[in-house]
Amino acid sequence: MKNLITEGYSSRVWSQDKPILIGCSSDMMSWAAKYAESERRTETKLSELPPLSEHPRLYPIGFSFKHSILKKMSGSRYAARMARLSSKIFGEVSPTDTKLSRKVVDLMSKPYYHEQPEVVNYYPKHFEVTRLMKTLRHFGLFRSEHLDFTEEMERLRKLRGKGRPARDARKRKKKNKIIKIY
């Protein structure tokens, strides 16, 4: 029988080659067990373990080894009640909760849609790019053949007299129409 000691919790343990630690995830336990076996030790302190960066799975921010509860604890009713109570205290999902409640917890733990970069930056920023290109074109740092062509066509139309009349000419025309009516 081997014994692993973690942050002040000592676990009794190995039933059928599976360690049962209070305060560690199953990945952490298997990793600690492999380390202990490779070092031929029967007791291992958490401080003696290699850094978590060498661990195959990184834990999310805010994950606490101290308060996490294992699915497999001893089969007594007392242990099950204590697991349920500690999960309520530390805001974790109770081991006895249904799949639906776990789905709700997973859904609520995700960030809001307006905070997700893949949602916010889904479309390119056309408005900003267009404004930037117009400003650069005004200073002569960007050349748009299409806009050059349309400006040239407008200039040629005005030279032929096809453009809209000047504002003063429009006003004069309206005044003349009014006079002719009376």
Image: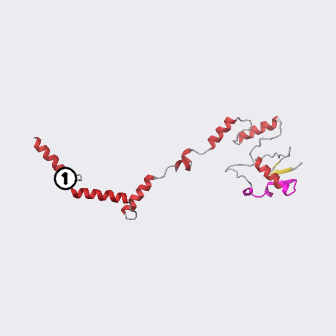
User: Within the magenta stretch, is there residue 85?
Assistant: no
> Which residue shows up at 41% across the image and 59% down it?
133
**Disc 1 target residue:** 168
Res. 50 visible in picture: yes
Q: Amino acid at mark 1?
A: Asp
Q: Nearer the viewer, residue 165 or 6?
A: 165
Q: Quadrant of the C terminus?
A: top left
Residue 73 drawn at (x, y percent): 81, 41
Q: Quadrant of residue 77?
A: top right
Residue drawn 87% across the image and 50% down it: 2
Query: Please, is residue 87 above or below residue 162 in the view?
Result: above
Q: How many marks can you see?
A: 1
> Compared to 112, does 32 lie above or below?
below
Q: Is residue 51 magenta?
A: yes
Residue 12, given in percent of the width and then of the height, sits at: 86, 46
Camera-side residue of 10 and 151: 151
Q: At 56% from the left edge and 48% from the top edge, which residue is drawn? A: 115
* Residue extending furthest toward the bottom: 140
- 108 with respect to 76 (left or right): left
Q: Position of residue 112 (x, y in %)?
A: 57, 44
Q: Which residues are magenta?
A: 36-54
- Report whether 29 appears left or right of 125: right
Question: x, y (%) of residue 49?
Answer: 79, 57
Quarter location, residue 96: top right
